[in-house]
Amino acid sequence: MSLQVDALRGALEPLVPVYPWIVFGAGVLLGWRFHRLQPILALVLLLAAERTLATFADAGAAPADRAVTAAVALLLPLDLAVLAWHSERSLRAGAGRLTLALLLVQPLAVVLVRQPELESLARALDAGRAGGPGLRGAALTQPELLAFGAALALASARFALRQTLIQSGFLWALLAAFLAVGAGTGLAATVYLTTGGLVLVLALVETSHHMAYDDELTGLPGRRAFEDALLRLGGQFAIAMLDIDHFKRFNDEHGHDAGDQLLRMVGATLTRTEGGGRAFRYGGEEFAILFPGRSAVDALPHLEALRRAIEATGFTLRGRDRPTQKPKRPVAAGPRRKLSVTVSIGVAESDGGEADPREVVKAADRALYRAKGAGRNRVVCAG
């Protein structure tokens, strides 16, 4: 392994004592701050495995010591795979409590493996190791390879069903664990497992940023991202505020699920904004569009194009008897209603000087209310 090269080993050794505590400590604190139990448990598992391998991977020929590292090689990948299949909600339910109980029992099992009474089990765990009984060989035993293969298959299937940054982080953590248990040295195990933990921490940070700045329903940047974008505006710019007409009545008549579908449809249309415009979910049924370096006159044709596109698309109301899952055989669709959807838009611009973007937002909002008062389904420019 590359980490066994003397020059690289000498460079890494001074950092090894603090590297795990910085990464895992910061990760657990972030997970606690963002109320994410799943990555916290994964990081604690990786830290426990790192401490165990750092202690016993270089321990020499003692069968009991090699059995400890073999137990880690068997348990760690399966534990990570089980955690990957949990959600934050399931971890707090009955299945999650059972998983936590199994995780708490495992340290006791690893300690028992070192007892003289279980020497036969220790030898069985280490049987088949490449390099003979006196070495922690680079190759894993067949049971260890099967454990990692099953874990990678389970984690990959979970990622295919739910492609999130956290699930991607679990795959990288499994790869790091595979390299760590096969490396044969405590230094390499520490570097690999801590780096796997670092990937999970970065995934947690990126996920939290996504939750804070992006709107999950529409996929557009959210209110916080809009406020940050306002701070970067200067010189000439235009801001448009867009509101779905009669949205409250639509929700009352057709339900909140249909309302969410309508918001997603409008959000998808706004992602195609041209003229340098960038759309944001402002709140409720209201959206904002920024046009840096553009005047209101420049933005008007692009806003008019959006208004016409939404009106032309309409909204097909799904039947109440529509199955929740796609049937294997096509079934005759019931009557569907296509509803007309319109939006009102108000747009305002800066004066090209040191205009406060928030004042421009207020001016665009006033123009929006004028558009609604004039009959809706139109674009009105402030002024």
Image: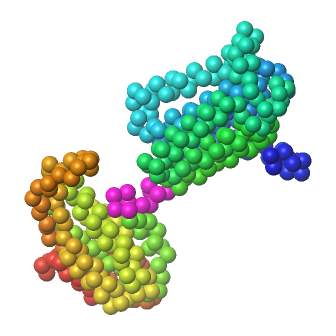
> Residue at left 42%, top 32%?
92
**Among all residues in the image, which is located at the extreme front?**
329
Comparing 338 with 250, the one in front is 338
Answer above or below: position of 7 versus 119.
below
| Residue 4, picture quadrant | top right
Residue 345 sits inside the magenta stretch: no
Residue 97 in the image: state x and y as whole percent.
45, 26
Residue farthest to the right, as pictured: 6
Give the image location of residue 246, x and y in percent.
Answer: 15, 67
Q: With respect to residue 13, does 66 lie above or below?
A: above
Q: State the residue at coordinates (27%, 63%).
A: 263
Magenta residues span: 208-219
Question: Within the magenta stretch, is there residue 213?
Answer: yes
| Extreme residue in the top direction | 117
Q: Is residue 350 left or right of residue 383?
A: right
Q: Is residue 360 left or right of residue 40?
A: left
- Image position of 187 with respect to 226: above or below: above
User: Which residue is depicted at the point 67% across and 44% down?
Assistant: 176
For the image shown, how many numbered marks are present on the structure? 0
Is residue 350 visible in this depiction of the protein? no
Splitting the image into 4 quarters, where does residue 106 fall? top right
In the figure, residue 193 lies in which quadrant? top right
State the colouring used for the structure image.
rainbow
The C terminus, quarter of image? bottom left
Q: Position of residue 53 (x, y in %)?
A: 74, 32
Q: Position of residue 227 (x, y in %)?
A: 42, 68
In the image, is residue 332 above or below residue 271?
above
Q: Is residue 309 visible?
A: yes
Front residue of 203/180: it is 180
Q: Is residue 179 left or right of residue 377?
A: right
Residue located 51% across and 36% down the image: 83
Say left or right for 39 vs 7: left
